[in-house]
Image: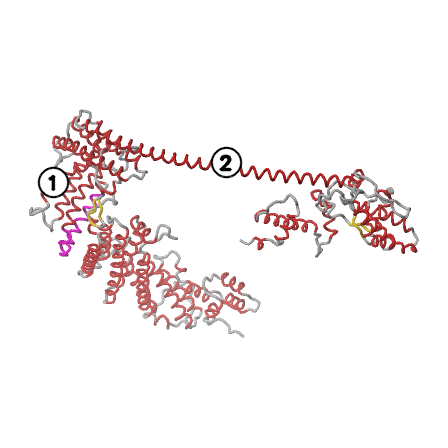
Amino acid sequence: MDNDRLTQLPMARIRTVMKTSPDMGNINPEALFLMCRAAEKFIEYMAKGAHRQGKKSLEYKDLAMYVENDDKLEFLSQILPKKITVKQYKAMMAKKPDTDDDTDSEDELEEESGNEATNKEGDDDDDDDDVVEIVDDDNDKAQQQAQQDSEDSASDSGESNSVISIDSSSDEKENSKNVSNKKSPSTVDERLIARFNQELGADLKNSNKCGDLVKYYRSELEDLRAKITVTDAACIPSVKSMIETGRSKLAELDEKETRLGDYEEKINEQIEAYQQLMNEVGDKMEQIRVLQTVRDYMALIKDIENISQELEASIGGKDDSKPIALYVALTGPNSILDRISGIEAPHLKMYARNTAFHWHDVLTAKYSTEFEALLKTIKWPNMNQTLEQFNPSKDHINKLVLLAEYLFLVKLPGDQDLLSQKLTPSIICPHYTTPVQLFVKPFRLRFQFHFSGNKQTNRLDRPEWYLTQVLMWAKENHIFVGQHFQSPALRAGIVNSSVRLEFVRGLVQLAIEKLIVDIEQIVQDEALFAHLIDEVLPFEQDLKSSLGYPNSYPSVVSVLVQPAYFIKWMAIEKKFTTDKMDAMLNTDDPFELLDPANLDELKIPKCADQFIRLLDAIKERYCCLPQPSQQLQFLELQRELIDNFRCRLLQLYNDGISPTKILNALNYLTSVLREWGENVHYLHLHAALYGPDADEISSVFDQTIEELNYCHRKLVEELVTWIVHEITARSRPYRYDLWPSMNPQDAKETLMVSASASEMFQTTINHLHDMERELSTNVFMIVVRMIATELDQWMISSMVMNTKFSAGGAQQFHFDMTRNLFGLFSQYAKKTNLLFKRINDSCILLTMPLGSAILLRETLLSEAADEDGCIRALQDVGLTIFDKKATLDVLDRRNDMPRIG
């Protein structure tokens, strides 16, 4: 990265300033960048500290004042001194004692001549606002005066003498190592002023002497330059001495440089000699390493030969543990094979592995023979006996356990996964330990005898025979194997495997191998394949539930879920379920309720219950599948069947089936799917479908439920529309009754329902009772609310707004609505006035006192009434839904309301 882009100051100039120091060596880019950034930060710090609020610029006096006030910046007091006026300067000079004119050096006179015109103009000018820089350096002045060496010359005019002072201290401003050093500016100014006052006096006419003074001081400077050269006899002794000393030191340095070159040649000669010696030593060390490798190689071969010889000698001995210990030393942890695994010696590795394989075969054959003999002694395998009936002696059990431990220890060297048996490209059975192979061996012989060849028990249409046999063998013997032989396996270092489940896996592999041979013929016949599926699925469920068989182990269903057979399986499932669904709906009365006497719960049609059972059976069939991807295909089949069932229900509705029956079926199906969405099985499928990090956990049936709800809403709307149409069709006598001319009812007489409303109310009652009897409770309540809403809107738009009411007519309408219509719905809702909000508001407005009605109309029509005021007025009279316009329209329906204007 270009550091110049990261800084504001030019880095090249910063490098130049740093190089002015004689002690500065090479400057790397990192140090230069840091110095540049430090300078920028210091400038920023000074600018921020010195800037005064309200000013747009930064002046010298601001910086000088900031340095003077901050003790931390004392080191800048001479670099940034505070400026004073000429008047202040004269006052300071008047307070100081006169200096000796004879102590002025020729260097100071040169500075005085250079500043003569400026100081003289300052003395002659009456303006006191001019400023000069003052540095308080009295200590330096005293030190420099103490170090003066000699006085060389005096002025020719005789009026004053000039002494040249050579200062041995270094000048910090010029960063040089000169012997002579100039006096501080304040001392030079004082002497110049004193000398000019003496030479020129107070008379302005003497100003023409300035030119003579300049010539005088120039001649003095020339003499001084001539005197400080080394060849001049009158050269200052201290200067000459220092120059001679420098020359002698330079000569010494040249001599040391010459000697250093000689030393360098000698050192190079020694380095070459030592390098040659190191090369010789390296060759010898390489030979030593080769010899050590050969020695180690021969030692390993000797160790292998010794172990092989000791095994040869001990194989026929009485101590059976010694050969096992020697074999473990050859192949076990920290063995010879472990020691050579990290070295490049292919021939040695091959020799060691061949030796290990040889003794593995020998020891396995020896102990396997003894193990099989003991199994025959205890009459293994156990057939058709319980664990209590199969009870070998403890002595035989102990010998079997000891031999099993030996066989567990005598295992092939290397990666055990390489020994796995690949039955098909997708079915790989891990390697069995030797004791488990010996336990399974007699079962394998019996299985091959009964279920291979031309035996009558070997039938393609009877897979349940060998599946049942394998399951029975596993249930009768797995506990015996697990109880007695898990401990020796743990002692042999087998800690991540269950001997019991490994034995069950060995038996299951017999069925897998058998099905792999028969599947090609079975799949050709759809009936045989369907029967095979029906037998394999319960076998898998029983295997997992009763024996705890893991899903990760190979199983019989693994053969069926291979791609070629799984597609066939899905096609059979789809055909079977579709036919089953058609059979459900083609019965005499598919919508017959399961329990028609139960009026408090869901009305469940028989077809809907059978369809749910069919979906649940599909779930039970595929929940044992090993892979989630396979289960998801069955889930998709379920959702496809639900969609087909929904379409069939709609077809039946179009064919004339009562909508209440269709609604009950859809309602039951939706409620069951909601419950299934919270089931653990379907939650796992949701995680497999959308991933475990999905934003929100939902149901796998969400989309299906949404489609069912849509159909449900449409059917409810059509049903409600039909019922409301039936009610309103019988309302004509009521709508055209003598509402404008009805006389008020006597308070002593009891109001009766209008005769013209009897048929309308009777129709309403009949439909409500029918819906209550035919629909599920939750669906019926939805229908009731929608009917009430439709009637509420229709009564206002079709009757109230098209009729004029006298006081008696309004009284009768209020009675018909609040006591009769509301009463019909009172058994389904606690507050019926909330179901008929518009009718309730209309009754309030039509029956309220005339004065109150007029006042309410005036309030609503008043120009001073704002929207909030109108709302409060409507709420005060008890209205819940009417706005200003609707209220005025209903008030106009009263005959007793005076006309506006």
Which label's residue is closer to the chain start, 1 or 2? 2
The boundaries of the magenta stretch are 518-544
- What residue is pinned by disc 1? 445
Residue 196 highlighted magenta (yes or no)? no
Q: Is residue 454 visible?
A: yes
In the rendered image, residue 223, in percent from the top left (x then y), is placed at 82, 48
Name the image quarter holding the C terminus.
Answer: bottom right
Q: Residues within 10 Å of mark 2 (few under 14, many from 20)?
A: few
Q: CA distance from mark 1 to mark 2?
A: 85 Å
Residue drawn at point x = 51 percent, y = 74 percent:
899
In the rendered image, residue 391, in percent from the top left (x then y), is placed at 15, 30
- What residue is pinned by disc 2? 270
In the rendered image, residue 573, in percent from the top left (x then y), is placed at 20, 56
In the rendered image, residue 420, in percent from the top left (x then y), is placed at 22, 43
**Label 1 element class:** helix
Rendered image quadrant of residue 563: bottom left
Rendered image quadrant of residue 441: top left
State whether the magenta stretch is mostly helix, strand or loop: helix
Of labels 1 and 2, the one closer to you: 2
